[in-house]
Amino acid sequence: MASEQEENANMALRPHSIINVEDPSHPMARVTEQNWVSSPLWSKIPIEIRLKIYGFAVCVDTSVRPKQIGFRSNKFVWGKSESVKSDNRAMLRNRDQPLTISNLARVCRAIYYELDAHPVFYQVNIFVFADLEDLYHFLVALTPRRLSMIRYISISISANFLYEDGVQQSNWKGHQESRCLELLSQCHNIKELTLEVHISPGPFTEYWARNRLAMIQKYLDISYTDLGVPSLVNLPFFRILVPFDHLGYGPILGRLHHTPGNYWHVAFRREPGWMTIKLVESANLAMRRRDAFNIHHGYVDTMRRMKKRPQWLIDLANNKDALDQARADARIDFPGHNRVAQDFRLYDRDVVSSNTRKEFRFVNQELAIVERLRAKYGADGELNWGYELHDVRWTDEEKIECQVSFRYPPGVPDGLFWEPIERVATGNGLVWFYETSPFKNIEDDKERVRLIRALPSPNDVIRYLDGMEMLINHTRTKKQTTLRLARWKKITKDWDKRITSLQYLIDKRDEKQAAREAKAAQRLAAREEKKKNKGKKGRGKRKANEDDDEEDEEDAGPIAKRLRSSRKSTE
C-alpha cells in the first residue's frame, strides 16, 4: 500500500502533464492530494487494474475520426460536426455526444492527471483520417506521451485521392508524406497503419476499381525499387485494405492467397474482368514482396507482428531537427510537445520581433490559438480591421462619413459605426458600395431616389479627397491601379444615369397612375350624371300622369271622384 501511495506521489512530480497538479496555489490542490491518499480508487485498487478499467471505459465501439476544429488549433472534433462561428472565426463543433474520455477527464484533477500519464484512450482505439493532412495535424497536436501510445491508424481515402494529378500525388510522394513519416517515427507502440481504398457498387464499379488498383500498383512500384528507403509503404506495419463499402470487408493486399474473384463474386454477384484480376494480383504480389523483405530482415514475424524497427525509421526518430521542422510546418500555435496550459510564453511558431508585439497577443482558449490584437488604424490612418461598408453621408460640418460594421479580427465590437471617409478610401469597400445599387432593399422607388440623392455622389467623393490619389493608394501592381481607376470612372459616369433612369421609371409610373385615376373619375362622373338624368325623367313622368288623372276626374263627374278617392285611401 505504501508503494502505491509513493507511486501516486511520484506521478505528481513528473513534468509531463498539460496541467500542474502539484501547484499549491490551485484552489483544488488540497482535494487532489486527499484523493491520492485517502480515496479507495487510488488507495485500494492497483494501477494495473485502474488502467484496465479506464481502457474499457474510453474504448469506442467503431472508430474515432479526428477533425481539426480550426486553422492553427490543437483541438479536434471526433465525430459528426457542424461549422459555427466563434468571435467572427469559423470553427467546427461536435454534433454527437462527447466521448467518454472527455467526461471522465472532467471528474477530478487526479483522474485527468492519471489519464494523461497513462493515455489508454490512444492505445485502445482506431483513428481514421480522410487524408494525410488530417493525420499530420493530429500527430503534431498530440503530446509525446499520447503520440507514443497510438497503435492503430487508418487512412480511408476517397475515390479521387489516388488520381494522377499533382495535387493528390503530392500528398503521397512529397512534403506531406515525409512530415508524416517523421512524426510516425515517434509512435513507438504502433502496430498497424492501414490505407483503405474503398470500392462502392454501381454501374461503373469495375472501371473505378481498375483505376484505383492501377494507382495502387504504381504507388507500390514507382520510385520504391529500394525497399529500404523511407516511405509509408516501406513501414513494417503498413498495409493496404480494399474494402467493399456495402459489406465492410474485402481483400488485404499481401495476404490474399486465392483468386480475387471470390471476393468480387460475393460483393457484386458477378465475376471480375481479366484486367481487374491482373491488377489485384500485381498489387498483391508487390505487397507480398515487401512483407517478405520485412520478414527476411527481422522487422516482422511470419504473422506480420512488429519485432524491431528499420534503421531508417530509427534515424528519423533520432533526428530532432527534422522533427522540429515538421512540427513547425504544421503551423499549429500550441503543438503537443509544448502544450502546458496553453502557455503563451511557449508559443514558438515564429520569432516575435519586439516586446511591443508580444503585448498585442492573447490566447483564444476556445480554439487554442494565439490571436494578435491588431491596431484599429494603420500608420497612414486607414482602418486595419476587416469591415463591411453600409452607408455614406454628409455631416453637419460638410464632411463625408462612412457607416461600417467590423468582421475581424476576433474580439472586434459588434454594431454599426461611422468613420471618416479617409479611413476607408484606400479599400475596395467604397468602390463596391457605389458599384452596387445603394438601398436596393427599399421597395418604394421614390424613397430610394430621395436617399440616393442625399448621398455624396462619386464626384463629390473625388472632390472631397482632392483627386483620385487616395482612392488608388495601396494597390500592389500597375494593373490593379489601372483597374481601380477604370472602376471609378465607370461609377462616376453611370451615377447620374442611374438616378435619371430611376426617376424616369417613377415619372412614367406616375403618368400611368394619373391617367388611370382620370379615367376612373370620368367613369364615376358619367355614372352620376346618368343617375341624375334618370331621376329627373321619372319625376316628370309621374307629374304628367297626375295631371291626366285630374282631367279625367273632372270629366267623369262626382261618382268617379268618390271612387278614385276611396281607392287612393285604400292604397
Image (spheres, rainbow, N blue to C red):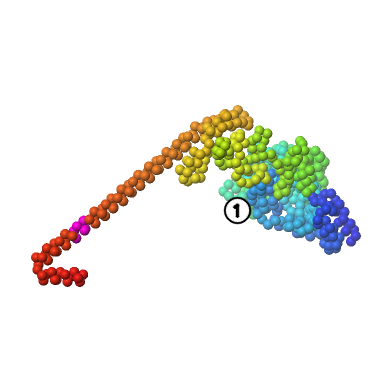
Q: What stretch of residues is rendered in magenta?
A: 537-542
538 inside magenta stretch? yes
Q: Position of residue 146 (x, y in %)?
A: 78, 50
Going by the image, does 292 lie left or right of 281?
A: right
558 inside magenta stretch? no
Comparing 385 with 566, the one in front is 566
Which quarter of the image is occupied by the N terminus? Answer: bottom right
**Residue 518 visible in the current orientation:** yes
**Amino acid type of the residue that numbered disc 1 sits on in the rendered structure:** Arg
Q: Residue at x 74, y 38 (%)?
A: 357
Which quarter of the image is occupied by the C terminus? Answer: bottom left
Q: Position of residue 541 (x, y in %)?
A: 18, 58
- How packed mark 1 is, by other alpha carbons closer than 10 Å (few <14, some 14-19, many 20 or more), is few
Q: Residue at x 84, y 53 (%)?
A: 24
Secondary structure, magenta segment, majority class: helix
Comparing 268 with 470, the one in front is 470
Q: Position of residue 285 (x, y in %)?
A: 71, 44
Q: Which residue is mark 1?
A: 269
Residue farthest along the top direction in this orientation: 478
Comparing 270 with 13, the one in front is 13
Going by the image, does 10 lie left or right of 440?
A: right
- The kind of secondary structure element at disc 1 is loop
Q: Quadrant of residue 89?
A: top right
Going by the image, does 353 lie left or right of 433?
A: right
**Residue 185 visible in the current orientation:** no
Q: Position of residue 113 (x, y in %)?
A: 81, 54
Q: Quadrant of residue 372?
A: top right
Q: Residue at x 88, y 58 (%)?
A: 5
Q: Residue at x 59, y 29 (%)?
A: 469
Above or below residue 133? Residue 462 is above
Q: Quadrant of residue 179?
A: top right
Above or below residue 209? Residue 457 is above
